[in-house]
Image (cartoon, coloured by chain):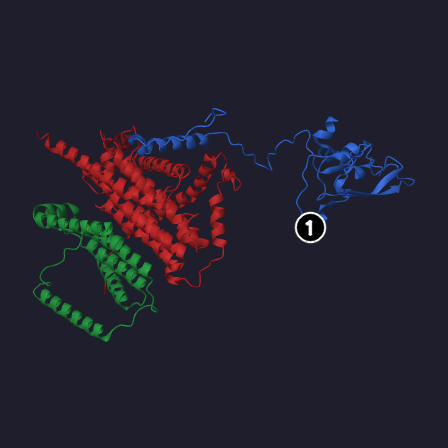
Chain colours: A blue, B green, C red
């Protein structure tokens, strides 16, 4: 039969010679292979101390953004909820009252904003849909939980720490990806 | 009382106790284990008599090999008190007579042995050492030794023939 | 009144020596479990345990604690007395081997010269064989008392394997004994460490090869770990065991491994002899005690190397099938050992009496 490639090899079925029957060379060969692995560099990453770098396009947990003065960006326009293919986002809008200007950037804000992380497929369409740069996907995983309710993330789970009050936590939460933007 | 005496009495007690257990225990596995303990005690006696080679060979051959085979057979047959067949009373009678005959033979054999006059050489005898034993075996007793080895060979050949059938 | 005439100092000396050697071998066995997992990890491109303490050094303590804390289960249908006796026997026979091994030459404490050997009996090697053959009972009794078909099968496998390989091991050592002319381990070591004397491995390479293979089989280590074949016999003869009784079985295996490593070093690699150095001149320059420590260290290093080989082989060679095992033992190892014995005997005879023709 004509071979399509030259990669296949016929199985060698010749009777073993005395040298091969002693198995000692084969054993020595095997031992040398295992010993060479003994000195190889280990690919293990000691997780809590070391972490693998996230790729620049990684899409993890959502973050609701604030501006430099610590005001929430979200105006509860609902575009993210419409864009969401898994229908994981729900929100309730409310109007900004007098004296709340330091909390919300626009006149309208999201009084309730929930993402069901069990439904979410982390596609990032909400991020693309948002006109206010209010939501983006960070570089963390959704942690495990004992209850399904625990996976419904409310506003206080999603909101980024205030850059004025807690600048360090804010920097940590922003992550590499947002900083590049 | 020095160490040798203490050890002697201890080993004697173990040997006799073990031997009694071999006969009295219901479970054959216990019997085998008690027999092994007896062998150990006997080996201890050999060591006290400075017959170290005999002691160790006793352990290797009897306790290490033959009793393992016994244990093998007993474990595979799984002898329990429930499966033990009822013994024939004629069999019991035959056993008693055989035991009595053995006792008579023993008495007759040991009657002439003057155990009082020959003292055991405790810790100083050198017949049991491997060099002397080897020299004795291969000089004075070389013919019986070789004949017994031929006997073993024939037993081995017989086993192979039986196995090939 | 019975007078107790016992040399108390002698008894004390031996008791301390026994205690020391037992605790050292337990410690070595403990850290062999750690080393086993480390070596396994490294050979498989992993790191091995590294969480408990630096480099995972406290891992054996954690393992031991876990085994102690576990629930002790004795199956209802088992034979309780034998079930408990089994692991004890396994442990005891594993420890007993250390009695005749010379760990160093001599040390001087309080004006007493103490031999670093529990008992220098003139049949040291035979004693080791006797103890080895006792090792079968731990497995057999444990397997049978569990009242479990798999355990029984594994126990029978283990026992027949150990008996088969004991023969080849004995024959391989006979060739060595022809060279040394002594059964005492101390004499064997002294002959090797005497100036101008080579280690026995030079004279007996084939004998050593047979010995090491048989040692693997006696310790029930891979490639001969059929008695505890996890995927064929569930878990082997210790399937029903839990808690520290299981620990005893596992521990006995590691102690056996250590002891056979020490034995290999003693018989074939000069024992406590420090290589490339004349021990006698070293004693003059450094003092007896210092040299004894160095000798002990040298023996330990040799043993550690063999323990590493045990692990290395474990992660290289797969398990034998049962018929292959028996074929190797009876049809390869024993004839080879016999040939080795014959050649050695001829050479020794020619050396003593000259070429007859």
Q: Is residue C116 above or below residue C194?
A: below
The answer to which of C23 and A36 lies nearer the viewer is A36
Residue C21 image point, x, y percent: 35, 46
Residue A145 image point, x, y percent: 67, 47
Q: Is residue B28 among what the camera can see?
A: yes
Residue B21 vs residue B155: left or right?
right
Residue at point 13%, 32% (across, down):
C350
Can you say which quadrant of the picture contains the N terminus of chain B? bottom left
Q: Residues within 10 Å of mark 1 (few under 14, many from 20)?
A: few
Count of numbered labels shown in the rendering: 1
Question: For mark 1, what is the residue?
Answer: A147
Q: Residue furthest front?
A: A1
Q: Residue furthest bottom?
A: B89
Residue at point 52%, 41% (across, down):
C53
The answer to which of B6 and C37 lies nearer the viewer is C37
Residue C300 image point, x, y percent: 35, 38
For numbered disc 1, what is the local secondary structure?
loop
Q: Quadrant of residue C319?
A: top left
Q: Is residue B106 above or below residue B151?
A: below
The answer to which of C255 and A110 lies nearer the viewer is A110
The answer to which of C304 and C78 lies nearer the viewer is C78
Q: Quadrant of residue A75?
A: top right
Residue C43 vs residue A83: left or right?
left
Residue A148 image point, x, y percent: 70, 49
Q: Residue furthest right?
A: A98
Q: Is residue B97 above or below residue C214?
A: below
Residue C352 vs residue B89: left or right?
left
Q: Quadrant of residue C335?
A: top left
> What chain does mark 1 sit on?
A
């Amino acid at each position: 039969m004509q071979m399509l490639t030259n990669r296949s090899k016929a199985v060698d079925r010749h009777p073993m010679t005395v040298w091969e029957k002693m198995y000692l060379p084969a054993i020595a060969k095997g031992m040398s292979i295992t010993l060479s692995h003994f000195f190889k560099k280990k690919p293990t990453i000691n997780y809590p101390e070391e972490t693998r770098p996230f790729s620049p396009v990684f899409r993890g947990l959502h973050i609701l953004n604030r501006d430099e003065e610590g005001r929430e960006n979200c105006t509860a326009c609902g575009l993210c909820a419409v864009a969401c293919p898994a229908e994981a986002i729900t929100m309730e809008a409310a109007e900004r009252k007098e004296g709340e200007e330091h909390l919300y950037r626009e006149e309208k804000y999201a009084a309730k904003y929930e993402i069901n992380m069990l439904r979410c497929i982390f596609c990032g369409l909400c991020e693309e849909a948002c006109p206010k740069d209010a939501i983006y996907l960070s570089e963390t995983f959704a942690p495990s939980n004992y209850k399904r309710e625990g996976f419904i993330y409310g506003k206080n789970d999603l909101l980024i720490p205030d850059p004025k009050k807690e600048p360090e936590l804010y920097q940590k939460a922003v992550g590499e990806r947002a900083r590049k933007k | 009382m020095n160490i040798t005496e203490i050890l002697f009495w201890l080993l004697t007690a173990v040997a006799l106790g073990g031997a009694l257990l071999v006969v009295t225990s219901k479970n054959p596995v216990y019997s085998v284990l008690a027999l092994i303990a007896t062998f150990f005690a006997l080996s201890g006696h050999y060591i006290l008599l400075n017959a170290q080679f005999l002691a160790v060979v006793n352990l290797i051959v009897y306790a290490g090999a033959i009793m393992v085979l016994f244990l093998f057979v007993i474990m595979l047959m799984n002898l329990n008190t429930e499966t033990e067949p009822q013994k024939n009373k004629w069999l019991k009678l035959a056993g008693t007579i055989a035991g009595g005959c053995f006792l008579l033979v023993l008495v007759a054999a040991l009657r002439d042995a003057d155990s009082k006059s020959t003292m055991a050489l405790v810790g100083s005898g050198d017949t049991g050492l491997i060099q002397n034993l080897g020299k004795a075996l291969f000089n004075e007793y070389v013919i019986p030794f070789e004949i017994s080895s031929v006997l073993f060979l024939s037993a081995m050949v017989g086993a192979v023939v039986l196995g090939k059938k | 009144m019975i007078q107790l005439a016992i040399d108390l100092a002698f008894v004390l000396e031996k008791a301390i020596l026994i205690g020391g050697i037992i605790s050292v071998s337990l410690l070595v066995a403990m850290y062999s479990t750690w080393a086993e997992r480390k070596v396994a990890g490294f050979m498989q491109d992993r790191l091995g345990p590294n969480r408990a303490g630096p480099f995972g050094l406290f891992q054996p303590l954690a393992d031991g604690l876990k085994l102690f804390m576990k629930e002790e289960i004795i199956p209802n249908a088992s034979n309780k007395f034998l079930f408990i006796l089994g692991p004890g026997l396994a442990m005891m026979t594993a420890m007993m081997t250390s009695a005749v091994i010379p760990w160093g030459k001599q040390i001087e404490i309080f004006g007493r010269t103490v031999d670093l050997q529990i008992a220098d009996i003139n049949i040291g090697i035979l004693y080791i064989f006797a103890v080895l053959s006792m090792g079968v009972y731990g497995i057999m009794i444990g397997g049978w008392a569990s009242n479990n078909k798999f355990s029984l099968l594994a126990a029978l496998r283990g026992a027949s394997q150990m008996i088969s390989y004991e023969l080849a091991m004995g024959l391989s050592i006979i060739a060595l004994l022809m060279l040394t002319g002594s059964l005492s381990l101390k004499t064997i070591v002294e002959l090797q460490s005497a100036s101008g004397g080579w280690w026995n491995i030079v004279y007996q390479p084939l004998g050593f090869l047979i010995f090491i293979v048989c040692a693997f089989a006696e310790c029930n280590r891979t490639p001969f770990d059929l008695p505890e074949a996890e995927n064929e016999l569930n878990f082997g003869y210790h399937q029903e065991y839990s808690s520290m009784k299981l620990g005893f079985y596992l521990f006995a295996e590691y102690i056996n491994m250590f002891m056979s490593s020490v034995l290999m070093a003693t018989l074939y690699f000069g024992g406590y002899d420090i290589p490339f150095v004349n021990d006698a001149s070293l004693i003059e320059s450094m003092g007896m005690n210092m040299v004894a420590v160095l000798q002990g260290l040298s023996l330990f290093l040799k043993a550690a190397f063999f323990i590493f080989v045990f692990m290395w082989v474990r992660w290289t060679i797969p398990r034998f099938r049962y018929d292959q095992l028996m074929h190797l033992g009876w049809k390869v190892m024993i004839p080879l050992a016999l040939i080795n014995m014959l050649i050695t005997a001829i050479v020794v005879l020619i050396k003593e009496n000259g070429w007859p023709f």
